[in-house]
Every structure is written in C-alpha cells, then in structure tokens.
C-alpha cells in the first residue's frame, strides 16, 4: 500500500511540474516512477556485488528490509531528477509579452 501511495504522489508531482512548464505531462510522470524503481534495482545490484566482494553476510531473504532500504534511495534519486528538470525548465521559460495593448502607440527609440 505504501508503494502505491509513493507512486501516486511521485507521479502527480512530476505531472504538475510538467504542466507548469508546458512539457509532456504523462511522459515525465511515468519517467519519475521508472527512476524510482531503477534506483532501487541498482542499489540491490551494487549491494549484491559488494556483498560478494567483501563477504558482508547480508540476509537476502529479508524482502521487507530491502523494500524499506529502497525507499530512501529511490526518493533521493527522484528528488535529484526533479531538481534537474526544474532548473533546466526555469532557464528555458519564454515570457510572452502581450503586444496587442501596444498597437497604435508610438515606438520609443533609445
């Protein structure tokens, strides 16, 4: 149940961000969820390799513990992705000037 709530709120936040900057809404909502799960998967692979190399004796049967370990890693990756997208889109915002109000006025020359 916690996983479904996380997916919903992560996707919704990216959907709202994409709407705010006129980007593809569903693409970034789905991509954010993919980033969350891929980060948890990569964390599992890295810990598996480190356990093999250094013989840490990790209990791989504890699936609840692995789920809890993947949550902060996934949220950290999603937060980084969100920050990157937000700063990129803030730089590329085009401000539209309403020039209809200026029709018929003299053009000021510098």
Image: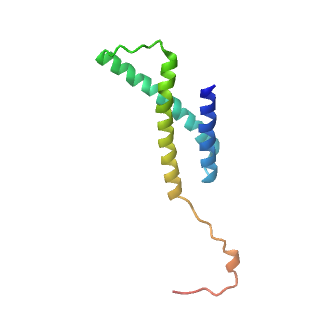
Nearest the viewer among 77 and 24 is 77
Nearest the viewer among 24 and 1 is 1
| Looking at the image, residue 18 lies above or below residue 11 | below
Q: Quadrant of residue 108?
A: bottom right
Where is residue 101? Give x, y as percent. Answer: 70, 77
Where is residue 6? Give x, y as percent. Answer: 59, 33
Which residue is at 67% across, 80% downward?
Answer: 102
- Quadrant position of the N terminus in the picture: top right
Q: How is the image coloured?
A: rainbow
| Looking at the image, residue 77 lies above or below residue 100 | above
Left or right position of 16 against 77: right
Instruction: Give the total of numbered labels.
Output: 0
Which residue is at 60% across, 36% downward?
Answer: 30
Which residue is at 54% across, 33% downward?
Answer: 34
Which residue is at 48% across, 14% downward?
Answer: 62
Where is residue 13? Give x, y as percent. Answer: 61, 43
Left or right position of 51 against 43: left
Where is residue 99? Give x, y as percent. Answer: 66, 74
């Amino acid at each position: 149940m916690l996983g479904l709530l996380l997916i919903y709120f992560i996707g919704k936040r990216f959907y709202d961000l994409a709407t705010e900057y006129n980007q593809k809404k569903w693409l970034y909502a789905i991509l954010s969820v993919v980033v969350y799960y891929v980060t948890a998967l990569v964390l599992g692979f890295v810990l598996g390799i480190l356990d093999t190399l250094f013989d840490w004796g990790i209990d791989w049967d504890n699936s609840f513990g692995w789920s809890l370990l993947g949550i902060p890693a996934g949220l950290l990756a999603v937060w980084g992705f969100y920050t990157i997208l937000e700063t990129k889109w803030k730089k590329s915002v085009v401000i539209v000037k309403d020039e209809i109000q200026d029709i018929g006025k003299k053009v000021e020359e510098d």
